[in-house]
C-alpha cells in the first residue's frame, strides 16, 4: 500500500512539473557576424541566411515574445522596463549576438551514381545573450548542422541556396535547444 502511494505521489509530481507553463522571454538581435577564420565567400553566403533564420526563430518560437510594445528605454529607465516585462508576463529580455563560427560548402562526386554529385554545407553558430537592462551575461548557445544533398552533374545556384538555408535553420535550432536548457536551470542561490 505504501509503495502504491509513493508511486502515485511521484507520478503526480512529474505531471505537475510537466504541466507548468514555460517561461516567456524577449530576444532582440544585436548583430550577426562571421569569425575571421571563416572564408569570406562562405561567410557572405552564410551570414544573411543565419540572420534570416534567427529572425524567424525569434518571431515564431513559442517561448519568445517578438515585440514588447510600449517598452521604455531600458538604459534610461531600467526599473520601468523590468516592470513592463513583468506586467506582460515576460520573465526576462536579452540582447543576442550571433557569430557564424563555421561555414563551408563542398561538392564531391558520387561513385555509385555517375551523373550525380553530393553538395555538403556545414554551418556552425555561437549565440551570446546579454540581459536587458544591465547587459550582464545571460546565456550562450552553440549549434551546428551539416546538410548533404544529391544534385545533378551541374550544380545550380538554387541547390546551393537551399542547402545554405537548411543548414542555417538547423544550426540555429540546435543552438536554441542549448539556450532554453540553460534558461530553464534555476539561478544559484547566493
Image (spheres, helix red, strand yellow):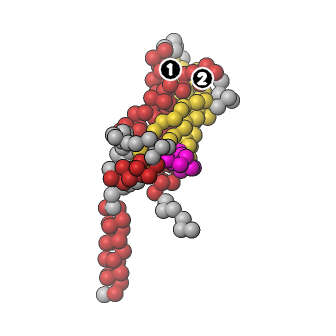
Which residue bears the numbered disc 1?
160
Main SS type for the magenta part? strand
Figure quadrant of the N terminus: bottom left
Which residue bears the numbered disc 2?
42
Instruction: Please say whether residue 137 is one of the residues in the magenta stretch.
Output: yes
Figure quadrant of the C terminus: bottom right
Q: Looking at this view, is 167 or 4 the one in front?
A: 167
Q: Is residue 20 left or right of residue 175?
A: left
Q: CA distance from mark 2 to mark 1?
A: 11 Å
What secondary structure is marked by label 2?
A: helix
Nearer the observer: mark 2 or 1; the answer is 2
Query: Pointer 2: residues within 10 angstroms few (<14), some, or many (20+)?
Result: some
Placement of 42 over or under 28, stated as above or below: above
Across and down, in percent, residue 66 comes to: 37, 39
| Dot 2 or dot 1, earlier in sequence | 2
Specify whether residue 19 is in view. Answer: yes
Q: Residue at x 48, y 54 (%)?
A: 183
What secondary structure is marked by label 1?
A: helix
Across and down, in percent, residue 155 comes to: 51, 14
Q: Looking at this view, is 101 or 162 the one in front?
A: 101
Q: Is residue 91 left or right of residue 12?
A: right
Placement of 91 over or under 73, stated as above or below: below
Query: Pointer 1: residues within 10 angstroms few (<14), some, or many (20+)?
Result: some
Q: Report the span colored magenta.
A: 129-138
Across and down, in percent, residue 76 comes to: 48, 43
Amino acid at each position: 500500500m505504501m509503495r502504491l502511494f509513493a508511486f502515485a505521489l511521484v507520478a503526480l509530481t512529474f505531471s505537475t512539473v510537466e504541466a507548468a507553463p514555460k517561461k516567456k522571454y524577449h530576444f532582440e538581435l544585436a548583430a550577426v557576424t562571421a569569425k575571421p577564420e571563416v572564408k569570406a565567400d562562405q561567410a557572405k553566403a552564410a551570414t544573411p541566411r543565419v540572420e534570416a533564420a534567427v529572425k524567424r526563430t525569434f518571431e515564431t518560437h513559442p517561448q519568445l515574445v517578438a515585440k514588447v510594445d510600449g517598452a521604455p528605454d531600458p538604459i534610461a529607465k531600467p526599473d520601468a522596463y523590468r516592470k513592463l516585462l513583468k506586467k506582460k508576463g515576460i520573465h526576462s529580455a536579452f540582447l543576442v549576438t550571433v557569430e557564424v563560427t563555421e561555414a563551408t560548402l563542398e561538392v564531391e562526386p558520387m561513385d555509385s551514381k555517375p551523373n550525380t554529385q553530393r553538395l555538403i554545407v556545414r554551418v556552425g553558430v555561437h549565440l551570446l545573450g546579454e540581459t536587458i537592462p544591465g547587459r550582464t551575461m545571460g546565456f550562450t548557445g552553440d549549434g551546428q548542422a551539416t546538410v548533404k544533398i544529391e544534385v545533378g552533374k551541374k550544380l545550380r545556384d538554387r541547390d546551393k541556396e537551399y542547402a545554405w538555408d537548411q543548414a542555417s535553420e538547423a544550426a540555429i535550432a540546435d543552438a536554441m535547444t542549448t539556450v532554453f536548457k540553460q534558461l530553464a536551470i534555476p539561478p544559484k542561490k547566493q
